[in-house]
Image (tube, grey):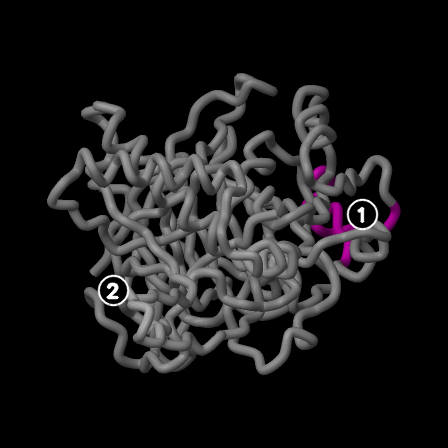
Amino acid sequence: MKSTTARIAILLTATLIAASCSGDDDAPEVTAAAVTTVAPTTTAAPNTTSTTEATTTTTTEPVVEVVLRQPLTGEVISDASEIPDRPALAVKIDNHPRAKPQAGLNEADLVFEEVVEFGTRFAAVFHTQDSDPVGPVRSGRSQDVGILSSLDEPLFAWSGGNAGVRAVIRDSSLVNLDAGFTSGYYRRSGRGGAPHNLFTSTEAMWVSTPEEFRTPPQQFPYLAPDVDLDDIDGEPATTVTMTMSGLNVRWDYDEESGQYLRSERGSAHPTELSGQVATDNLVVMAVRYQPSQADRRSPEAQVAGSGPVVVFSRGVARPGFWVRLSIDDPFTLVVEIPEDDDEDESVDDAADETAEAADGDTDDADADVDADAAGSGATGIDPFQELEVDLVGLVPGRAWIALVQDAENFVAWE
């Protein structure tokens, strides 16, 4: 198994090759970039004679200080034992007006907001915190597989779906906790009536963790520990607005808490447990939606490839690109992709390196050991820290990821 760092480097290279060779005039403008990791120590021996003792010169790369993080919040930790020994848990949460106030949105490490047939729905991902209750729990969509697969076999709590969607979930790497076949769900009176009143708790869902499971790997890059979070470079952004499937959404920056607060339909978005919906990072990704093969009535976000992104943290907007070669990979957020002076040679070299990496060809005997150790995500090692590209790093904390329909002006701020 390759390390997460190697997979990120591969996906950046391969995606950029595809972008440079596609010839698609409608695709976002992306230029080729070289992605490298720290090279191993090398030893060079000069020419020698029979009367001169051979000498060697050793070149050593600077030692990179290893940063350990909670995988889904990016919080710096001192030891991997601080990572909760459990898989990620994703819960599909209703966003119908009768579903409010929802429970668990402010307790989740990550929340993905996705377009559905009418309005939006949430996939709340828990790992470091619990929530009791959590819900209302609603049905899934085929796009949940693409959004959540990089969490490495997460538990998936949902109320079910039609036959096509059930088949897609059943055949995926998600651990299926369908409410029709899993204990721990219940209906609550006075909560909008069915189907908007199905609830559970994270504790009740984690009881169904398989005997063999994997802790989630890191999903996004974060700012380096020495960055002053009160002085992030970017454009001022105290108000953020977007439209998702006809739903007008607004986020306002609260300087006191350092978070963005969510409103929709002109009103503050409440939660049952912890006030207005809030987040430390608002990640607005422009993605394409197309009809789902499982249900042509449902839109399906295309979350493998690349596209524009804007990250909002601490009242600042930072535009860039998201890159993700496959649904099994984390989301790499880059500022820009510099143009190479010799594009053809760069593409050829990158293609060779990508092919070798895909075949598992490596001269570093320790690489396989490191890859196996980091494969489960339990090491806490930040897989992005060795990439020699400019990343759009999140601030440590919770993140809300809005998957907005790709358009020229997919998000606005001031």
Q: Name the residue under label 1.
A: 187
Is residue 82 positioned above or below 411 on the image? below
Q: Viewer-proximal residue, 147 or 366?
A: 366
Q: Viewer-proximal residue, 36 or 49?
A: 49
Camera-near label (1 vs 2) is 2
Q: Tell whether 100 sits left or right of 89.
A: left
Snapshot quadrant of residue 360: top right
Q: Residue 238: in sight, yes or no?
A: no
Q: What is the distance, in whole Å, between disc 1 and disc 2 at their CAs?
A: 40 Å
Quadrant in which the C terminus is drawn: bottom left
Q: Which mark is residue 21?
A: none
Q: Tell whether 161 sits left or right of 218.
A: right
Task: Give the mark nearer the N terminus: 1 vs 2.
Answer: 1
Is residue 200 positioned above or below 317 on the image? above
Q: Name the residue under label 2.
A: 237
Residue drawn at (38%, 67%), measured in percent from left and top? 43
Q: Tell whether 24 sits left or right of 369.
A: left
Q: Tell whether 259 sits left or right of 378.
A: left
Is residue 163 positioned above or below 142 on the image? above
Instruction: Label 1: state its secondary structure.
Output: strand
The amino acid type, in three-letter code, at marker 1 is Arg
Residue 407 spot, x, y in % from top left: 27, 35
Q: Which residue lies furthest to the front in this view?
A: 51
Residue drawn at (32%, 49%), measured in percent from left and top? 309
Q: Viewer-proximal residue, 38 or 364?
A: 364
Residue 225 spot, x, y in % from top left: 41, 79
Magenta highlight: main SS: loop
Residue drawn at (42%, 57%), measured in percent from left and top? 263
Q: Where does the magenta region start and end? A: 183-201
In the rendered image, residue 63 lying in the magenta stretch gets the answer no
Residue 92 spot, x, y in % from top left: 64, 45
